[in-house]
Image (spheres, rainbow, N blue to C red):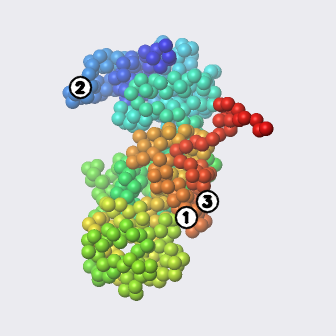
């Protein structure tokens, strides 16, 4: 019988939110759970709280056997009480000396067969394991909050973790009813690393003065299909968590520009603008409810014909009676709406020999819910108002932002995809695990590699190269994973041929 099926008893150390969630999950899955904490009263409170949750789930018809699950919760007298458990999961505070000391003491009292797991979200598993005489016993088992609802678990071997343990933990996670992915013991592991793509680019956009936080969030939700925009997400996780994590991942990769933190969050952190939990962040909160500023409505404007290089846009405008022009060149009366990928509307106008004053931009990633209209310093205000009114006539929301390379949605998406391409390129996780982890943990509508394939690798690459050319910023350098697959016509989700593949299968026939 495999180890994961033989596991009967697990000790969970730490009764905070994560520890309680892990204990609830394990007990509901049929495991005996020894619940331990340095504070005995915290254990009693945790058992009561988990029991109440079982009753609540049973009352809603979402759980059977609540009484049996409650009986499997066994309070123990401290983290170092004698035990014969099969697995210890540590969920104490995120402090390296504290975790090292705990595991060093556990090694003295636990049987040799006991596997150790740390729920760390940011500390090196290898570094924690240095406290053990046998570091091969320890691996990372990173759950996400709230544990019963967030199905993803990262399984992270350290440099000396025994070879059999990661696979065994993967099987155990599946036994618990959750979805495991394997990650390497690198800064941010998998999910927190991948999540920097959205956060850092949103802050870069804000730092350049292209759009306000609410505008970026609306575009993120309505155009990209994100559950939460990047700024409301930072408010939810809180800047005292998000900013240090970003700095840690960036420094852990020795200052890689693509992971660069923003002085905006450093300043707001020092000012105490942490987010939802303190009632003030990028948004204000009243009784926990986000106070989002109202959307601006299109002003009264002169009706003018619209000429565009985007046929779908002209179709949408024509369907609601907006006068449109479809020739090769605009008339002198027309407002020009350009929809470039990667480049700003102003740059596209100059390249095409069009008069910049009559040009505004429309992000081609606009959807049935929202248009993004961009204006540059030379845009004639009256004509821009006419463009705004024309787009609003379709019944869609319109967000007006400053023109810039890649606009807003393209930049966010390209950064999300490129960051995960770097993870794949460095073999930090498999393409399938990258997509599964990000989709489940971050709530994106698609996994990032799948998303990039849907939009088109060549298109994503074009956006990154245009941004790199326009800004000179090395944060936009494209991953070799993306470049090779775009040029070779491979899917971003495919590993492709590797040197190891040459060792498998029959040898090629010898030439005559």
Q: Label 1: which residue?
A: 467
Q: Position of residue 303 (x, y in %)?
A: 29, 81
Q: Label 3: which residue?
A: 474
N-terminal of the two: label 3 or label 2?
2
Query: Is label 1 in contact with label 3 (beta carbons under 8 Å)?
Result: no
Residue at 33% x, 74% y is 388
Of residue 248 and residue 3, the one placed in the foreground of this image is: 3
Q: Label 2: which residue?
A: 58
Q: Residues within 10 Å of mark 3 (few under 14, many from 20)?
A: few
Of residue 508 and residue 415, the one placed in the foreground of this image is: 508
Check the image and report above or below for 239 versus 378. Answer: above
Query: As drawn, which residue projects farthest toward the bottom?
Result: 332
* Residue 273 seen by the camera: no
Residue at 46% x, 30% y is 91
Q: Is residue 299 left or right of residue 84?
A: left
Residue mark closest to the camera, 1 vs 3: 1
């Amino acid at each position: 019988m495999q180890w994961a099926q033989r596991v009967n008893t697990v000790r969970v150390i730490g009764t905070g939110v994560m520890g309680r969630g892990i204990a609830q999950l394990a007990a509901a899955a049929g495991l005996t759970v020894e619940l331990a904490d340095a504070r005995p009263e915290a254990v009693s409170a945790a058992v009561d709280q988990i029991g109440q949750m079982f009753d609540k789930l049973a009352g809603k018809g979402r759980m059977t056997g609540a009484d049996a699950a409650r009986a499997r919760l066994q309070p123990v007298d401290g983290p170092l009480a004698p035990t014969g458990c099969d697995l210890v999961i540590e969920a104490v505070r995120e402090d390296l000396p504290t975790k090292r000391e705990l595991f060093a003491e556990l090694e003295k009292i636990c049987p040799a067969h006991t596997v150790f797991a740390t729920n760390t979200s940011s500390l090196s598993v290898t570094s924690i394991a240095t406290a053990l005489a046998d570091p091969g016993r320890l691996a990372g088992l990173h759950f996400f909050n709230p544990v019963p609802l967030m199905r993803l678990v990262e399984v992270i071997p350290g440099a000396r973790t025994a070879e059999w343990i990661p696979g065994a933990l993967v099987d155990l996670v599946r036994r618990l009813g959750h979805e495991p992915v394997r990650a390497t013991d690198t800064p941010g592991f998998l999910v927190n690393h991948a999540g920097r793509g959205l956060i850092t680019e949103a802050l870069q956009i804000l730092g350049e003065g292209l759009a306000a936080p609410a505008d970026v969030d609306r575009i993120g939700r309505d155009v990209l299909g994100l559950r939460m925009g990047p700024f409301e997400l930072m408010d939810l996780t809180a800047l005292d968590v998000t900013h240090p994590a970003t700095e840690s991942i960036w420094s852990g990769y020795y200052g890689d520009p693509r992971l660069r933190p923003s002085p905006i969050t450093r300043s707001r952190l020092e000012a105490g603008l942490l987010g939802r939990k303190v009632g003030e962040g990028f948004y204000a909160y009243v009784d926990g409810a986000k106070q989002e500023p109202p959307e601006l409505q299109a002003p009264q404007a002169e009706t003018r014909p619209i000429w565009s290089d985007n046929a779908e846009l002209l179709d949408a405008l024509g369907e609601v009676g907006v006068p449109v022009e479809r020739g090769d060149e605009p008339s002198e009366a027309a407002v020009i709406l350009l929809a470039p990928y990667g480049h700003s509307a102003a740059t596209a106008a100059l390249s095409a020999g069009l008069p910049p004053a009559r040009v505004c931009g429309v992000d081609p990633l606009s959807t049935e819910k929202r248009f993004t209209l961009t204006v540059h310093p030379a845009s004639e205000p009256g004509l821009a108002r006419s463009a705004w009114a024309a787009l609003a006539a379709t019944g869609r929301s319109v967000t007006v932002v400053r023109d810039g390379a890649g606009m807003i949605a393209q930049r966010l998406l390209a950064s999300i995809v490129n960051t995960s391409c770097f993870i794949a390129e460095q073999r930090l996780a498999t393409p399938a695990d990258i997509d599964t982890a990000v989709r489940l943990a971050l709530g994106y509508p698609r996994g990032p590699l799948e998303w990039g394939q849907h939009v088109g690798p060549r298109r994503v690459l074009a956006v990154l190269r245009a941004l790199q050319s326009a800004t000179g910023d090395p944060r936009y350098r494209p991953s070799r994973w993306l470049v090779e697959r775009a040029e070779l016509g491979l899917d971003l989700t495919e590993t492709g041929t590797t040197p190891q593949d040459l060792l498998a299968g029959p040898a090629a026939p010898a030439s005559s």
